[in-house]
């Protein structure tokens, strides 16, 4: 049975750049489980609390993408408070622990990864019920899911164009007192499974980022905070999208050259990606990109 001593901080990669910094988290690498659900909490009124509950089986990693908040973890015998205020640190919470998120700063943004799809029966919302469950479960080592990466099947690369890319409206679960929650479920919300999330932050106002293309990677680009413009280029046509809502995303199919421009101050660009980082999938030279498109 997990205890608060099994909760730990995971240091995520941080790439410094004068145009803004980048961090990312990959399943079965930085995230110690296969990602099944990705969700983010935003517009929480300053000082409010969220998430007083426990999971029977779901494991979590929580990241403060912007702002700050505290995560209080309780195993029935002791509790610990973890102050999250850096976008390159994640808090791993095993299954079977009561947790609450408190002291949200204004405009804070919480990113969470889950090891399971949403299952209402996995939640425990009553603290007394949780204590009774803890007493009923025999002592055992924490259960950590061991998932092998699924084998990918090589497929011919299809050449999409900019009109194959579109905006996606995501569910927004609203609460007047506790802010908003948006969820992406693997196998349900998007036409691909999320295996990596990366995000740009500390981007100076008006800066540009992300001039490159991917050969096979699919992406959902979200303005988790602030706003920016994404310009897509298929070698023949260009198309621009203005992103400024954390519950809307731009679905970018493989083979698009993309530029991220006109960042507002304090903007956070979050990208849900269909695969882990592969250097061979990137095209960083525009002429090489045009040759790729013309193959």
Image (cartoon, grey):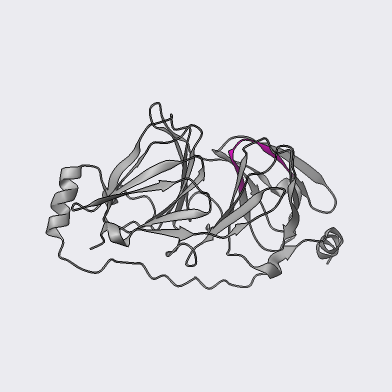
In this view, the residue in front, 244 or 218, is: 244
Q: Residue at (45%, 60%) from the top-left corner?
A: 10
Which segment is the magenta one?
221-230
Q: Is residue 19 left or right of residue 89?
A: right
Q: Measuring 72% from the left and 49% from the top, which residue is drawn there?
A: 18
Q: Residue furthest top?
A: 176
| 153 horizontally vs 288: left or right | left
Q: Is residue 122 visible?
A: yes
Whether residue 9 is in magenta: the answer is no
- Quadrant location of residue 3? bottom left
Q: Is residue 195 visible?
A: no
Q: Position of residue 132 (x, y in %)?
A: 13, 51
Pick whichever, 13 or 263, lies toward us: 13
- Label count reads 0
Residue at 64% in and 51% down: 21
Residue nearest the observer in this picture, 259 or 226:
226
Residue 205 screen position, x and y as percent: 71, 37
On the image, the x and y values in percent for residue 172 come to 47, 36
Most frequent secondary structure within the magenta stretch: strand
Left or right: 295 as drawn, with respect to 21: right
Q: Quadrant of residue 214?
A: bottom right
Q: Is residue 225 magenta?
A: yes
The quadrant of the image that shows the C terminus is bottom right
- Along the line of sight, the residue nearer the viewer: 120 or 2: 2
User: Left or right of 187: which side holds 250?
Assistant: right
Q: Give the x, y percent position of residue 276.
A: 58, 64
Q: Quadrant of the N terminus?
A: bottom left
């Amino acid at each position: 049975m997990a205890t608060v001593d099994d909760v730990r901080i995971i240091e995520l990669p941080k790439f410094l750049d004068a145009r803004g910094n980048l961090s990312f988290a990959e399943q079965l690498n930085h995230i110690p489980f296969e990602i099944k659900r990705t969700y983010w909490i935003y517009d929480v009124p300053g000082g409010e609390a969220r998430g007083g509950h426990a999971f029977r089986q779901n494991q979590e990693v929580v990241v403060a993408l912007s702002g700050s908040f505290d995560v209080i973890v309780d195993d029935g015998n002791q509790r610990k408070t973890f102050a999250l205020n850096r976008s390159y640190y994640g808090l791993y919470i095993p299954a079977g622990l009561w947790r609450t998120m408190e002291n949200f700063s204004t405009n804070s943004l919480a990113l969470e990864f889950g090891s399971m799809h949403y299952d209402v029966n996995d939640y425990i919302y009553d603290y007394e019920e949780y204590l009774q469950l803890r007493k009923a479960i025999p002592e055992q080592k924490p259960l950590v899911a061991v998932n092998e990466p699924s084998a990918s099947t090589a497929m011919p690369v299809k050449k999409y164009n900019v009109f194959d890319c579109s905006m996606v409206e995501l569910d927004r679960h609203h609460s007047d007192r506790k802010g908003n929650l948006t969820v992406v479920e693997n196998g349900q919300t998007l036409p691909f499974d999320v295996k990596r999330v990366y995000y740009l932050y500390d981007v100076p106002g008006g800066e540009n980022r992300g001039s490159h293309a991917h050969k096979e990677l699919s992406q959902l680009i979200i303005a988790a905070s602030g706003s920016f413009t994404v310009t897509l280029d298929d070698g023949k046509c260009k198309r621009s999208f203005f992103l400024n809502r954390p519950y809307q995303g731009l679905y970018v199919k493989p083979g698009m050259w993309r530029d991220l421009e006109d960042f507002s101050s304090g903007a956070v660009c979050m990208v849900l990606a269909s695969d882990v980082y592969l250097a061979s999938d990137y095209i960083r030279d525009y002429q090489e990109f045009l040759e790729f498109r013309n193959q």
